[in-house]
Image (tube, rainbow, N blue to C red):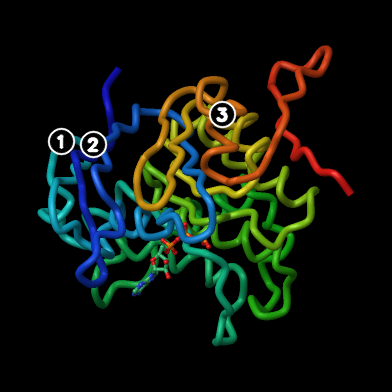
């Protein structure tokens, strides 16, 4: 299968000690890939390398067989859209204008947005269920709504690859499912490749085609969920005792901590 992203043996460090080492994987076209790992294992750092915000000290990252460093900013943004971890929004913009800002790779200097840009924003907002919020102030909507607005903004870039950093952190279970469903729909219906960090092992198992399991800056396991989410892997990486429940009628194994109160 063709890959949209190839990561070859990268090493990254903020200072002397390497924080990511021997990271080597491919992201197949049209797949849904989740990056799991404990706090501080390097997930966000890896995503920042994938979208070119940080550069590896060794190894290469290629997008459609071209090194990511060789892309111009706007050109890269037509293929890859990134939704960073939830952050506060400081300015007063309507939800619609916030989403429209995602069209920046297509809007020419000194030329306002076209009807095509407006249409792309509307379509992205309808796909993520935020069209009804269009006239609201971005600072006056809920965290879950804002997450979906940020995904809508990324979608207006019409990316082939959508990179998300903890898109469901801080959300209640309804919004967690809602956002993962939106991503899965875009993945299945529009063929957008998804690479996301997640903390919820079981939701990752349910939604992903492949999982990358990081621990202390190294890839411990990468494969389909059933081969990565094993008791052995989870106990080793998260340093807790777990058991795997195979629930009747459920396609996905369910991992729960073994606690003695
Ligand atoms: N700008 C930075 N400068 C120096 N060290 C950093 C910087 N950003 C992150 N780190 C360190 O790198 C390590 C990995 O951080 P990273 O945010 O990639 O982990 P993570 O797996 O995403 O964690 P979490 O699940 O808690 O979000 C941590 O020890 C963190 O303190």
Q: Earlier in the sequence, mark 1 or mark 3?
A: 1
* Mark pair 3, 2: CA separation: 28 Å
* Residue marked by disc 3: 232
At label 1, counting other C-alpha atoms closer than 10 Å, the crowd grade (few under 14, some 14-19, many 20 or more) is few
Q: Which residue is mark 1?
A: 65
**Residue 196 location, x and y as percent?**
49, 46
Ligand 1 in which quarter: bottom left
Q: Residue 27 vs residue 215: left or right?
A: left
The residue lying toward the viewer, choosing from 66 and 16, is 16
Please identify the quarter of the rendering in which residue 247 is found.
top right
Q: Which numbered circle lies on residue 6?
A: 2
Residue ID at (53%, 52%): 38
| Residue at far left of view | 70
Compared across the picture, whether 141 is left or right of 187 comes to right
Q: Which element is circle 3 on?
A: helix
Looking at the rendered structure, the secondary structure element under dot 2 is: strand
């Amino acid at each position: 299968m063709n890959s949209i992203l190839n990561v070859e043996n990268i090493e990254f460090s903020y200072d002397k000690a390497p924080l990511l080492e021997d990271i080597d994987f491919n992201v197949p076209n049209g797949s849904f890939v989740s990056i799991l790992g404990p706090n501080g294992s390097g997930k966000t750092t890896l995503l920042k390398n994938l979208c070119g915000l940080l550069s590896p000290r060794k190894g290469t990252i290629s997008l459609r067989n071209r090194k990511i460093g060789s892309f111009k900013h706007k050109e890269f943004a037509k293929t890859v859209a990134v939704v960073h971890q939830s952050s506060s929004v400081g300015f007063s913009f309507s939800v619609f204008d916030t989403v429209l800002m995602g069209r920046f790779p297509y809007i020419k200097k000194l030329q306002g947005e076209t009807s095509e840009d407006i249409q792309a924003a509307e379509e992205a907002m309808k796909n993520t269920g935020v069209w009804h919020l269009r006239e609201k102030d971005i600072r006056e909507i809920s965290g879950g709504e804002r997450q979906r607005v940020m995904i809508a903004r990324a979608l207006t870039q019409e990316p082939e690859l959508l990179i998300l950093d903890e898109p469901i952190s801080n959300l209640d279970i309804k919004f967690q499912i809602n956002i993962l469903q939106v991503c899965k729909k875009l993945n299945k219906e529009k063929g957008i490749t998804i690479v996301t960090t997640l903390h919820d092992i079981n939701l990752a198992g349910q939604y992903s085609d492949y999982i990358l399991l990081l621990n202390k800056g190294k890839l411990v396991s990468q494969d389909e969920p059933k081969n990565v989410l094993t008791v052995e892997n989870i106990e080793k990486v998260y340093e807790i005792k777990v058991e795997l429940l195979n629930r009747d009628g459920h396609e996905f194994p369910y991992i729960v901590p073994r606690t003695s109160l």
